[in-house]
Amino acid sequence: MPAGRRYNPFRMIITIDGTVGSGKSTAAAGLARRLGATHLDTGAMYRALTLKALETGVPLEDPAALAAMAAATQIDLDGTPGAQRVRLDGKDVTQAVRENRVSVNSHYLARTAEVRKILVAKQREFAARAGNIVTEGRDQGTVVFPNADVKFFLDATPEVRARRRQEELQARSEYKSFREVFEEVTQRDLRDSTRAADPLRQAEDAVRIDTGDMTIDEMVDVLVEEVRRRVKEAT
Ligand code: C5P
C-alpha cells in the first residue's frame, strides 16, 4: 500500500502484471476468489479485438483501422473469478479468444496506442463499477492503476512458462512442439517489453514473485498473505 494511503476495505485495487505463462490469470482468479473480489482479465480485451480483426478482415498492420474497430466494439467481461465469460458485440467468445492464432496475433492490437487508450478507459470504468478488484495484464500497476493498493509482478524462467503454455494448448487439443511454443513465448515477451506504448515492466512498488517452483495453491497463498499483511499494516 503506498505510504500515507488509507485502506478502504471495500475499494481495494490489486494489480498483477507479468510475462506470458507466469501464472497471472490463475493467480488473479485464485486471489479474487479468496478475497471475494472481482477479477478483470485485461488480456481478454486485447484478445477479443484480435479475434474480431481476424474474423472480419480488418488489416492488423493498419493502426487507424484497428482503432476505429476498437471504438466501435462492445466488449463485456463479467468478472467472475475463474469462470469469467467474454462477450464480443453480444456474442460469447470465451473459448475462441484462447485460440493460439489469437495469442500470436494479439501484439498488433497491443502495440497500437489508440487501441490501448480505448481499452485503458474501459478497464478504469470496469474498476470504478467494482468493489474490490484484482486486475491482471501487462500495464496494470504501471499505467492503468498507478495508485493501486497492492501490486504484484509474476515471472518464471522461459522454459517453465513455455512448458505451462504447451500444456494449456494440449488441454484444448492444440498440439505443438516444445521448441515452437518456446519461440512463441519468448517472441511475445520481447514484443510486450519492447513496444513503445505501455510496455511490460515491473512497477517500482510491485512485489516480484518467481512462480517457477510453486503450485497454484502455493502461489495464491503467497498473494493472499501479502495482501493481508498490507491491510494489517495499514489499519
Ligand atoms: O495475458 P494474455 O496473454 O491473455 O494477453 C494477450 C495479449 O494482450 C498479450 O500478449 C499482450 O500483448 C496484450 N496485453 C497487453 N496489455 C494488457 C494485457 C494484455 O498488451 N494489459
Image: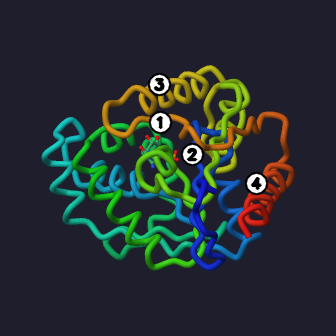
Do residues under tags 4 and 3 come within 8 Å of each other at their CB atoms?
no
Disc 2: CA contacts within 10 A as few (<14), some (14-19) or many (>=20): many
Give residue 223's mark.
Answer: 4
The residues tagged by marks 1 and 3 sit, at their Cα atoms, a distance apart of 9 Å
Q: Earlier in the sequence, mark 1 or mark 3?
A: 3
The residues tagged by marks 4 and 1 sit, at their Cα atoms, a distance apart of 20 Å
- Amino acid type for the residue under numbered disc 4: Leu
Q: Which residue is mark 2?
A: 17
Instruction: Report x, y in % for residue 211.
Output: 76, 39
Q: Nearer the viewer, residue 230 or 52?
A: 230
The kind of secondary structure element at disc 1 is loop
- Amino acid type for the residue under numbered disc 1: Leu
Q: Which residue is mark 1?
A: 200
For ligand 1, tell me if the residue under mark 2 lies within 8 Å. yes
For ligand 1, tell me if the residue under mark 4 lies within 8 Å. no
**126 versus 96 height, above or below:** below
The residues tagged by marks 2 and 3 sit, at their Cα atoms, a distance apart of 15 Å
Q: Earlier in the sequence, mark 2 or mark 3?
A: 2
